[in-house]
Amino acid sequence: MKYLWIIIMFLLLTSGCSGGTENNDTESDSGSDSNSNSDSDSDSDTDSDSDTDSDSDTDSDSDSDTDSDADTDTDSDSDTDSDSDTDSDSDMDTDTDTDSNSDTDTDTDTDSDSDMDTDTDTDSDTDTDSDTESGTRDTESDTHNSTDTEDSTNTAEIHYLGRFDHREPDSPGCAWSNCGVGTRFEGDALDINLSGAGGISFQVVLDGEPTSTIITEGGEWNSDPTVRAYRLAENVTSGPHDVQIYRNPEAMFRVVKFHGFEVTNGNIVSSPPPFTRKIEIIGDSISAGYGNGGCPFNAATEFGAAAYGALAARELDAVAHVEAWSGRGMSVNLDGSTDGIVPELYNYALPDDDQTDWEYSEFIPDAIVINLGTNDFNGGVNRDNFIDDYVAFVTRLRGYYPDAYILCAVNDAGSTFGDEIDEVIATLGDVNVAKINLNAPNWSGCSGHPDLIAHQAMADTLVDRLKDELGW
């Protein structure tokens, strides 16, 4: 018996020593767990299959992880941590578990996890990790509702809205309608530095509300390399503010280049993308906002940021890429020519520069509106050619964007090409391709185009459809 007691005492002493070396772990649980005991475990959780569990657990984990945690934790669970995790994820699980004990389980799980598990095992520690890990997820409860949440992992100081040519990284340029940039800042005032085409107006949006308009210096159709500063916001309240600008005139009025922001008595703040919902509008003068500000038509009377696509996007808390050029068609342009039809211009970041191939993976739209046909039929298109070209273009888009909801638009009650659109849709046989009529009153803009009131009505129609179909 004496020797038996000596052996027991020896085992207890050695067990106490091994428990004392566990506190080098780097887990610092106390930051994410909401437990009432301050176990400040700092496990490095190297999971080397030798499990020296600092919870004074005797932790006989041989793949059943029956941690008999004699923790002073206030949780009512028996912490059976049945981590027989045979998952071979090599994730660095930073699981933000709300376990009410901050156990330093260094379980000798048979998983090859190099997990720095701060598992949120909710009271039975069955390790169904509701991980927010950056590796593979276990039984994640991720609903992937990305349209309603910011992506906090993809922050940046500058957000590009629309297609940009980045061949000159310090001065990227854009030309398509509604293109622009956004940022978040703290300070007294915010300026933007621009060069390039003169007479180009941009709509300024501060914290979600349109505020002012800036116009680039210089004459229309002229391009000036001089970099000039334009005031976007001033006299704002303290704290962070989100600002975006959106181009009004279409691409024919030439490229504007962006040279950065400047903050007075403050700084630019890194932020998630301002929008997660994405819409693409592909069209002609109607979609570009031709003459919606009146006549004569010029850069000063075209408000692309107040055209139906841009308005709908703002209402839906989305960003809209608009690829639209007045007078162009799907098969034939208004003047009967076939050069520079919209499906060709769609290839480029800058539509009049064939050296600026667009990378389609940079923007994956949830919804696409194609509003083409008016110029084709006014330009004498062959009906069958129009249908064939339309089908080919939608098929091409479907290849780029397998999950997009695609709307083929007509713009009047009778529609001069409504029957052709019906045939296109029937030929495609795609349940996610449908027709929409954007007809609205007040087509009293320049040359019979929709004015600002009509564009708002068209936007309302589009908003209703997208809410119904996409659940927005």
Image (spheres, rainbow, N blue to C red):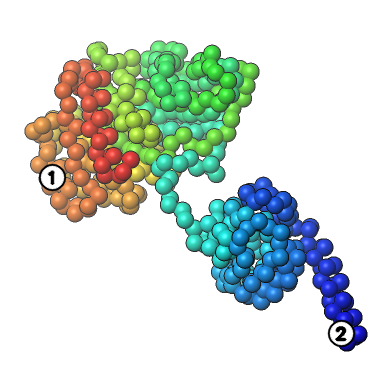
Rendered image quadrant of residue 210: top left
Q: Which residue is mark 2?
A: 4
Task: Tell me the SS state at disc 1.
Answer: helix
344 is higher (above) or lower (below) than 254: below
Rendered image quadrant of residue 382: top left
Q: Position of residue 455 (x, y in %)?
A: 25, 25
Q: Position of residue 391 (x, y in %)?
A: 21, 48
25 or 461: nearer the viewer: 25
135 on left or right of 250: right
Q: Residue at x 36, y 43 (%)?
A: 365
Residue 133 visible from this viewpoint? no
Q: Which residue is mark 1?
A: 422
- Mark 2, other Cα within 10 Å: few <14 / some 14–19 / many ≥20: few
Q: Position of residue 454 (x, y in %)?
A: 21, 23
Q: Residue at x 21, y 17 (%)?
A: 446
Q: Which quadrant does the N terminus fall into?
A: bottom right
Q: Residue at x 25, y 49 (%)?
A: 432
140 or 454: nearer the viewer: 140
- Which tag is nearer the camera, tag 2 or tag 1? 2
At label 1, which amino acid type do we have? Asp
At label 2, which amino acid type do we have? Leu
362 on left or right of 44: left
Separation of disc 2 and disc 1 at Cα? 91 Å
27 is higher (above) or lower (below) than 210: below
Badge 2 or badge 1: first in the primary sequence = 2
Q: Residue furthest bottom?
A: 1
Cβ atoms at labels 2 and 1 below 8 Å apart: no
301 is higher (above) or lower (below) than 128: above
Residue 308 visible from this viewpoint? yes
353 or 108: nearer the viewer: 108
- Mark 1, other Cα within 10 Å: few <14 / some 14–19 / many ≥20: some
